[in-house]
């Protein structure tokens, strides 16, 4: 057997998110949603999603790609979350149901998804951008220093964000979603550490990952503090308009930081990733084995992890399994 390469963390390109009683995994344009049905069976839906622009050209443009990838993740996340909710809430869950091929969403579904995503973005902007700005402006007569006022606004923005995360973490249904979130991270960490994708190996993997959306949102908050400190406008309305216009820029910068963190492993990357990794202790929980099985099913529907381990780490899982099988057959012959 060929000698395996030294173990190290290697980017595999797979990402995902937790859905209701399941996990969505995406690899390139392909995605899969695996959900544990109320009857205990795992239902898997696969499909393709090439983005809102339907072109890969944008994905190669630094900073600009972060904006579109963020919107794409919201759109695909909303679709898969809706599908998982509909599946789980079927009136007759005990009745066996044949798998159906993924269908392209109709015009009505696309409009509903687009409207929901647009409303979500507007609500997030109102809560995390406009509200902190408004509250900090109330202190403008007491704090004359523009830098201090910008720092206060940033502190308020981060505090509101952390408070929001803490509040939803206390909800029972969200806690189960966070357990599936942990299963998603564990599967990706297991693969990128060069381990065979089994329940046992996934169990021992970390539930924090540097390419997490939670870390991305935290970077959005931190980057906004820095930009708003150095970009100063005297007129209050114009200052608010500048903040709104800078949102795509902030998203683009934050995405590049997350992308960098997912592909490299050194002291600087670990340092800048530390705040997001700490926050993930709130947004991920340790999953049970049944949840891990769902996450593994989602990974295997879009990613050949055995080929990845062979190409990246030199581990030929199929060869090992064949050798083990031949060894078992030999022992059986001797016993006979």
Image (cartoon, rainbow, N blue to C red):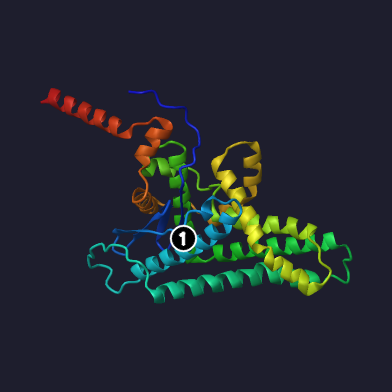
Label 1 crowd (10 A; few <14 / some 14-19 / many >=20): some
| Image side of residue 46 versus residue 327, left or right | right
| Image side of residue 170 versus residue 314, left or right | right
Which residue sits at x=48%, y=52%?
A: 182
Q: Does any portion of residue 204 appear in the rendered image?
A: no
* Residue ranking furthest to the bottom: 108
Instruction: Establish if 192 lies above or below 298.
Output: above
Which residue sits at x=20%, y=28%?
A: 326
Quarter of the image where one finds residue 93: bottom left
Instruction: Establish if 89 lies above or below 305.
Output: below
| Image side of residue 280 versus residue 330, left or right | right
Instruction: Establish if 10 lies above or below 92.
Output: above
Residue 162: percent from the left, percent from the top?
64, 61
Residue 261: percent from the left, percent from the top?
58, 44
Front residue of this view, candidates 278 and 264: 264
* Residue ranking furthest to the left: 336
Tell me the residue that label 1 is attached to.
Answer: 51
Kind of element beneath mark 1: loop
Please identify the quadrant where the C terminus is shown: top left
């Amino acid at each position: 057997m060929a000698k395996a390469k030294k173990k190290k963390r290697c980017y595999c390109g797979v990402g995902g998110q937790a859905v209701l009683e399941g996990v969505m995994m995406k690899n390139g344009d392909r995605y899969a949603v695996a959900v544990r049905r109320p009857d205990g069976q795992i239902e898997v839906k696969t499909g393709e999603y090439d983005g809102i622009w339907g072109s890969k050209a944008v994905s190669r443009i630094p900073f600009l790609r972060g904006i579109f990838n963020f919107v794409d993740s919201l759109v695909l996340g909303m679709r898969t979350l809706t599908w998982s909710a509909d599946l789980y809430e079927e009136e007759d869950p005990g009745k066996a149901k044949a798998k159906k091929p993924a269908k392209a969403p109709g015009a009505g579904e696309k409009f509903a998804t687009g409207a929901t995503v647009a409303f979500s973005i507007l609500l997030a902007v109102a809560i995390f951008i406009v509200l902190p700005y408004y509250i900090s402006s109330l202190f403008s007569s007491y704090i004359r220093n523009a830098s201090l006022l910008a720092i206060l606004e940033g502190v308020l923005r981060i505090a509101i964000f952390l408070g929001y995360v803490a509040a939803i973490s206390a909800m029972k249904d969200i806690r189960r979603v966070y357990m599936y979130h942990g299963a998603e991270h564990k599967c990706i960490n297991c693969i990128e550490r060069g381990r065979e994708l089994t329940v046992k190996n996934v169990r021992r993997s970390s539930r924090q990952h540097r390419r997490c959306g939670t870390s991305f949102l935290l970077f959005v908050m931190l980057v906004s503090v820095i930009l708003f400190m150095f970009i100063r406008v005297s007129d209050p309305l114009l200052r608010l308009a500048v903040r709104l216009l800078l949102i795509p820029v902030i998203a683009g910068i934050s995405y590049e930081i997350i992308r960098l963190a997912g592909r490299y492993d050194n002291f600087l990357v670990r340092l800048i990733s530390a705040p997001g990794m700490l926050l993930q202790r709130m947004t991920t929980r340790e999953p049970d084995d049944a949840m891990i099985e769902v996450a593994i099913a989602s990974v295997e529907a879009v990613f050949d992890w055995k080929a990845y381990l062979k190409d990246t780490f030199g581990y030929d899982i199929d060869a090992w399994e064949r050798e083990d099988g031949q060894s078992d057959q030999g022992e059986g012959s001797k016993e006979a």
